[in-house]
Image (spheres, rainbow, N blue to C red):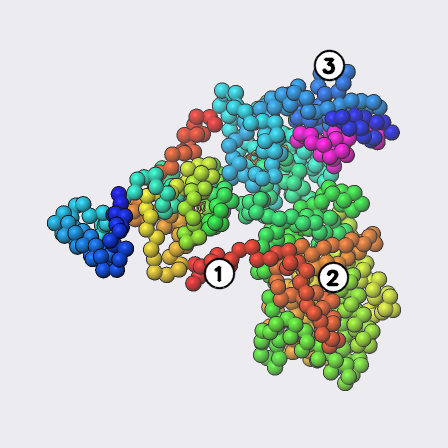
Amino acid sequence: MPKITINGQEVEVEEGSTVIEAYKKLDENIAHYCWHPGLSIAGVCRLCMVEVEGHPRLQIACNTTVQDGMVVNNNSEKVRDTVKWGLDFHLINHPLDCPICDQAGECGLQEQYMEYGKYDPEMAERKVKKRKVVDLGPTVVLDSERCILCSRCVRFTEEVTETNELGIFNRGDRSEIGTFKDKPLDNKYSLNTVDICPVGALTSKDFRFRQRVWYLKEADTICTGCSTGCSVKVYYNEEGAWRVKPRHNPDINGYWMCDEGRDVYKFVNKDVRLLTGLQRKDGQNQELPSVDAAKLAGTVVRDELEKDKNGVALVMTGQFTVEETQSLVGTFAGDLGCKQVYHWINNEDSFDSFDGLLLRGDRNPNTKGLEKVLNDQAINNTWADLKQKLESGAIKTLVVAAPENPSLFPDLDEKIALFSKVQNLVWLSAAKNEALDGLNTNVWQVPLKTFIEKSGTYVNFQGKEQPVKAVTTIIEDALTLTEVAGLLKGSDVNVTDEAQKMTSLKYNYFTQKRGNL
Amino acid sequence: MSLVTRPGELSRWYLPGILSGLVFTFKKMVSNIFNKKKMPTLNYPEEQYEYGPRFKGNHVLTVKKDGSLRCTACMLCATNCPAQCITITAAEHEDPTVEKYPISYEIDVLRCVFCGFCEEACPVDAIRMGPEWQTAAISGSEFQYDIRQLAYRPSLQGGVESRVDEQERHSSGI
Ligand code: SF4
Ligand code: SF4
Ligand code: SF4
Ligand code: SF4
Ligand code: FES
């Protein structure tokens, strides 16, 4: 393997890799716009200049292959000066948009300008005006003026999605990104172009103007939108989560994620969540603390089990962590001695489908984990069996660990209609569900935590175990399935909130909300 | 101006102290009755003190030529505010040259420390601090200033025009 010296440090890199990769390996600072590790090399921005000893002229690091014994630097006066003038060219037609630009705060141009620029512009000509707020498709908005023509987005649609919607049109300083007639940017991965755009030219319709990025904290977690389990970062503040972006993971998702996965932040926020425990008894709805709701449900389950061993069943979905699944299924099969545990598969027909890139038909993050737990307990009941028992009235009490993301369960209403044939329904779910408020059965609803509020492990389609940490707390009263399992079997559970420690009250909410006094 | 002269040796004693105080009060009373102009106090609230235009008092949101808000909802003021009393909600404007504007802009003026950092942070001269300084109100919610109060309160007579004009900037090619 060739050894090269970068800014005085020696590093060994793969044969045939480029100088910029060596920089990245050392975590050394280097300016670049057009190079992206997940795309081909374009070499158009001319910002990644380096000085190679023995070469009279500067080279671009992204398109120079390393050779053994190369001595490279990018901190000499000559390099800094070249980058500075390169940057000046990029900024010739760039508008003064930072105040209204969504990228501000995480913008490549701003970063490079703080590092290399800070000069008076020497351009006397007028700026070329281009189209603003161009609707590229259902998810992305383009601002041509801000574009620096790095061509990352074009290469993405060419190489990754192979849909070729984007192209560079016109010539010279009139060049701009655009779509072809009647062919909008509409593919399942389109929002990745927003992530890789180094400036604010491409913005996401969903996130546009909703928050300034510097108000958001980020944390690593995984996407629970399907069984691929892409590594993601979630951006949140004390009000809730605001967006999701992919995180590099060479084994699973590379640099990308799908557009549907970006919606997972929506179902963790307060507006769609079950906020407290609910009891519906004899047609009366009543709110109560979640712990009390779980305890009441536990009493009912245990009473019914005493009356009839086969009158109680548990329905599981693959939406929960391995630890939670283990404790709930373990409680039923072990402590309560009830082996009637069923696996609710929401989409039988498309369950095994795969779109060729990332998205899988199995829209549960932990199907593999659930299957393993059921196997360990030697449970292999079929859904048809449950259906028959529900219809015949053999099962009187049903506990359902319902999906935290109901939008991925198109058969939800149909299943609720089936479940409502029992006398007592215990519904454990993070999501609020109005359909349950009008049922003729007794219902206990217990609010659960969503994937960003709890620590645990998910097993993806490859069988790869992915541990995640709790990020923040959104609903304080919500419980994990493990806690619910403990309460159902009647033991005293010390309800802890791991994430709450991290989000200790920053503001005095009394004075913040004075307007309502 | 010093109103009180240093107490002499005699006034350390009880009666001379009281009496010299009363003499002073009486002298002031007589001079105030016969020479009202020299009186240093104001009959607030009938008479009010006018501060100079650069006084950092109540905030003003400036407007464009057409009377709409100049603010672009960049939230730099809210970011810079040490009291965290500015709350802005941004929205998409139908005019693509404006793009972003605030649908709500609120200052909790009781939290404000009148430091003027918001004014300094603003890139487009959209927020200023004016010479008005009276913040009295009866209920708590009246201290939550909204756009109507900040930009269009009656004393501003239709709004203060911003110095930064987008149209001018565009036509000069920047
Ligand atoms: S792309 Fe970057 S430099 Fe350009 S307006 Fe947006 S934040 Fe500012
Ligand atoms: S829109 Fe963004 S990613 Fe595409 S060429 Fe322009 S700057 Fe590059
Ligand atoms: S004057 Fe200071 S405290 Fe008051 S709103 Fe402005 S920045 Fe905040
Ligand atoms: S007042 Fe100025 S700094 Fe504050 S959001 Fe509006 S434009 Fe930005
Ligand atoms: S990153 Fe090397 S030329 Fe753009």
Q: Position of residue A75 (x, y in %)?
A: 68, 24
Q: Nearer the viewer, mark 3 or mark 2?
A: 3
- Dot 2 or dot 1, earlier in sequence: 2
Please state the chain letter of the residue tagged with numbered disc 1 in the rendered image.
A
Mark 3, residue position: A56
- Dot 3 or dot 2, earlier in sequence: 3
Give the alpha-carbon distance from disc 1 to disc 3, as whole Å. 66 Å
Asked if residue A87 can be seen in this view, the reply is: yes
Type of amino acid under label 2: Phe
Residue at disc 3, secondary structure:
loop
Type of amino acid under label 1: Phe
Mark 1, residue position: A510
Asked if the magenta segment contains residue A15, the reply would be: yes
Is label 2 on the same chain as label 1?
A: yes
Type of amino acid under label 3: Pro
Residue at disc 1, secondary structure:
helix
Q: Is residue A146 above or below residue B24?
A: above
Asked if residue A350 can be seen in this view, the reply is: no
Mark 2, residue position: A320
